[in-house]
Amino acid sequence: MTPNCPNCDKLLTNVGYQPTRIGPLLSTEGYKGIIYVCPYCQHVLGVGFDPLALNADTASNAAHEVERQLGPMLSEIVDGLNQLLHKV
């Protein structure tokens, strides 16, 4: 079943979107979001997190955390290997 726009009552076979930020008012911080709108009358149908941006942010944050936690250990391993190579 395809819904109709609650404002203009036209059949919604597709939905438009506009980028937005979701976060505290008057703040530049927050998450990337999407405003879903009727393609005919631009009535706001809903707001949600941008799933692609959310996935990218999650992957980036995870990579930074892994680097933060493993960075010192990896540096020690590389230093140890370099010392071994110089002894040979």
Image: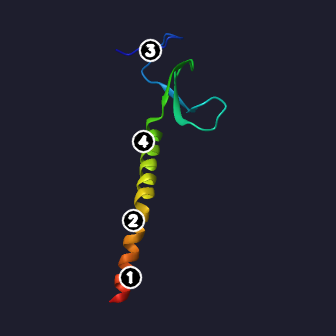
Whole-angstrom CA distance, mark 3 to mark 2, is 58 Å
Tell me the kind of residue under disc 2: Met
Nearest to N terminus: mark 3 or mark 4: 3
Tell me the kind of residue under disc 1: Gln
Residue drawn where x is 52% and y is 33% of the image? 33
Whether residue 18 is situated above or below residue 57 in the rendered picture: above
Residue that label 2 marks: 73
Nearest to N terminus: mark 3 or mark 2: 3
Tell me the kind of residue under disc 3: Leu
Whole-angstrom CA distance, mark 2 to mark 4, is 28 Å
Q: Nearer the viewer, mark 2 or mark 4?
A: 2
Q: Nearer the viewer, mark 3 or mark 1?
A: 1
Residue that label 3 marks: 11
User: For the C terminus, which image quadrant?
Assistant: bottom left
Left or right of residue 69: residue 46: right
Nearest to N terminus: mark 2 or mark 1: 2
Nearest to N terminus: mark 4 or mark 1: 4
Residue that label 1 marks: 83
Nearest to N terminus: mark 2 or mark 4: 4
